[in-house]
Image: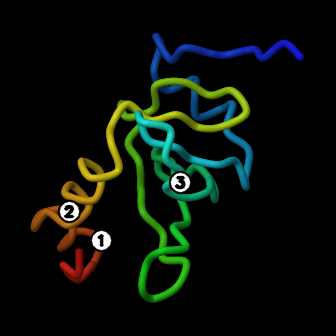
């Protein structure tokens, strides 16, 4: 089976290739969630490990390295979690710093 990988050189067009339910993996290949939809120019992902269950997080298009059978990010899961827990991001999205 041949996979067509769009490498993300142009950035935002990657958002057009994302389908609801696609796995989202970090730069090390660890699944961090599944794609929900594109909203406000960002990828909205659902993370099953969050409390409350299935809380959404947003991924900027700059973080998307490639889209094939998965959405591949150019950040590790730890880097993403630190960003999502940061004070400005947490306040803007009304999140509590539980990470």
Query: In the rendered image, which residue does mark 2 sit on?
Result: 89
Please give the name of the residue rendered at 55% of the width and 58% of the height, measured from the top-left corner.
Answer: 33
- What residue is at 23 percent from the left and 83 percent from the top? 96
Query: Does 1 sit left or right of 88 as displayed?
Result: right
When asked about the image quadrant of residue 3, the answer is top right
Does dot 2 land on a helix, a strand or a loop? helix
> Badge 3 is on which residue?
39
Residue 7, quarter of picture: top right
Count residues near mark 3 (Cα–Cα under 10 Å), then give few for <14, some for 14-19, many for 20+. few
- The reply to whether the C-beta atoms of the residues labelled 3 and 1 are less than 8 Å apart is no
The quadrant of the picture occupied by the C terminus is: bottom left
Q: Where residue 57 sits in the image (x, y, percent)?
A: 42, 63
Location of residue 75 in the rendering, given as x and y in whole percent from the top left corner: 33, 37
User: Going by the picture, which residue comes out furthest to the right?
Assistant: 1
| Mark 1 surroundings within 10 Å by alpha-carbon count, few (fewer than 14), some (14 through 19), many (20 or more) | few
Q: Badge 1 is on which residue?
A: 93
Q: How is the model colour-coded?
A: rainbow
Using residue 8 as the reference point, say whether residue 19 is left or right of it: right
Q: Secondary structure at mark 3?
A: strand
Counting residues from the start of the chain, the first of labels 3 and 1 encountered is 3
Q: Nearer the viewer, mark 3 or mark 2?
A: 2
Mark 1–mark 2 Cα distance, whole angstroms, equals 6 Å
Q: Secondary structure at mark 1?
A: loop
Residue 15, percent across and down? Answer: 58, 34
């Amino acid at each position: 089976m041949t996979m067509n990988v769009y490498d993300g050189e142009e950035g935002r067009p990657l958002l057009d290739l994302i389908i609801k339910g696609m796995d989202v993996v970090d730069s090390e290949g660890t699944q961090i969630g599944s794609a929900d939809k594109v909203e406000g120019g960002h990828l909205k992902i659902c993370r099953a490990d969050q409390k409350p269950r299935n809380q959404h997080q947003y991924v900027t298009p700059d973080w998307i390295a490639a889209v094939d059978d998965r959405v591949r990010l150019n950040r590790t899961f730890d880097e993403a979690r630190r960003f999502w827990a940061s004070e400005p991001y947490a306040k803007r999205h009304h999140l509590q710093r539980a990470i």
